[in-house]
Image (tube, grey):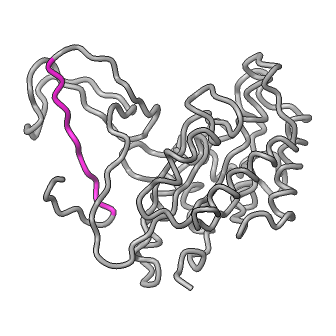
């Protein structure tokens, strides 16, 4: 335990001193926050580093818990690179979970609700590739998080797209299998008392990666989205797809929200996502 006052929405810097060469046992790729790596020597108490390299990956640290008074609780966001905030401006906390946290803090009824970002770039519900699949990491990354009371699920695009784009035909999944995956997430979270909110999958057409998007995969995305919107399986639906898509071409991102790769929103797009969330979903009833 460290006796340190941490303000709401504050940035916390954590330093490690590694006297010997060591392989990172944990890594979070593209965290969109600068990690500074010094030359030899112990600089854990230094305000600046004379010699350094930088990366946007995180190493070793997987989380920080803080002590609070009263009935604090947390919403956990599980997903892929859109939940990570890929395409937003690094070091400015413009991911949609960050911006949701700002809104929650500004509302008296939700000011004691924290946000945990459990996004992983390229992450899938049903298969490993970039990180452990969502079903396997659900306990570690969501269910055991301190104070977890709500879960937002924005995941499934990578399950549809990665097998064809990366030549993994044995890992192709059907709409029914993705829905079964959602069902397991919902059941396991509800068993521990969490409210579970789902979002239709965001638009993907135009991503400049050969074989990534096809009309057949778009049809699967639309089928998944229809189920999310109409099944009643989730406690509520937060429709990020409706916020981000171009009304004149619904398979594509609205240009004003496009970071440039036609898949990941820019800062304005992430702001629009956060602004679309009904804060009453997180008020105590």
Q: Position of residue 170 (x, y in %)?
A: 81, 20
In the image, farthest residue toward the front = 191
Quarter holding the C terminus is bottom right
Residue appearing at x 70%, y 59% in the figure: 198
Residue appearing at x 12%, y 35% in the figure: 44
Q: Position of residue 127 (x, y in %)?
A: 69, 30
- Going by the image, does 137 lie left or right of 255? left
Residue appearing at x 56%, y 41% in the figure: 137
> Start and end of the magenta stretch?
9-19
Residue 16 magenta: yes
- The quarter of the picture where residue 120 lies is top right
- Going by the image, does 105 lie left or right of 183? left
Note whether 186 is above or below 135 in the view shown: below
Q: Position of residue 168 (x, y in %)?
A: 77, 18
Q: Main secondary structure of the magenta part?
A: loop
Note whether 21 is above or below 262 in the view shown: above
Residue 104 magenta: no
């Amino acid at each position: 335990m460290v006796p340190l006052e941490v303000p709401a929405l504050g940035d916390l810097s954590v330093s490690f001193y590694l006297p010997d060469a060591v392989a990172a046992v944990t890594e979070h790729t593209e965290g969109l926050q600068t990690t500074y790596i010094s030359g030899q020597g112990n600089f854990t108490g230094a305000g600046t580093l004379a010699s350094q390299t930088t990366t946007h990956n995180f190493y070793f640290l997987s989380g920080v818990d803080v002590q609070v008074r009263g009935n604090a609780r947390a919403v956990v966001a599980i997903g892929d690179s859109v939940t990570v905030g890929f395409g937003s401006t690094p070091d400015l906390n413009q991911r949609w979970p960050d911006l949701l946290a700002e809104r929650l803090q500004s509302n008296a009824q939700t000011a004691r609700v924290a946000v945990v970002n459990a996004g992983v770039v390229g992450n899938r519900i049903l298969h490993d590739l970039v990180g452990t699949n969502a079903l396997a990491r659900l306990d570690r990354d969501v269910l055991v998080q301190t104070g977890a009371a709500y879960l937002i699920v924005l995941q499934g695009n990578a399950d549809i797209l990665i097998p064809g784009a990366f030549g993994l035909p044995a890992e192709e999944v059907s709409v029914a299998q993705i829905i079964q995956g959602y069902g397991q997430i919902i059941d396991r979270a509800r068993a521990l008392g969490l409210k579970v909110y789902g979002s239709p999958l965001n638009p993907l057409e135009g991503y400049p990666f050969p074989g990534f998007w096809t009309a057949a995969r778009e049809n699967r995305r639309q089928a998944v989205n229809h189920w999310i919107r109409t099944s009643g399986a989730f406690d509520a639906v937060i429709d990020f797809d409706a916020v981000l898509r171009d009304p004149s071409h619904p398979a594509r991102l609205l240009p004003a929200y496009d970071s440039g790769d036609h898949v990941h929103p820019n800062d304005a797009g992430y702001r629009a996502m956060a602004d679309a969330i009904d804060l009453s979903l997180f008020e105590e009833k």
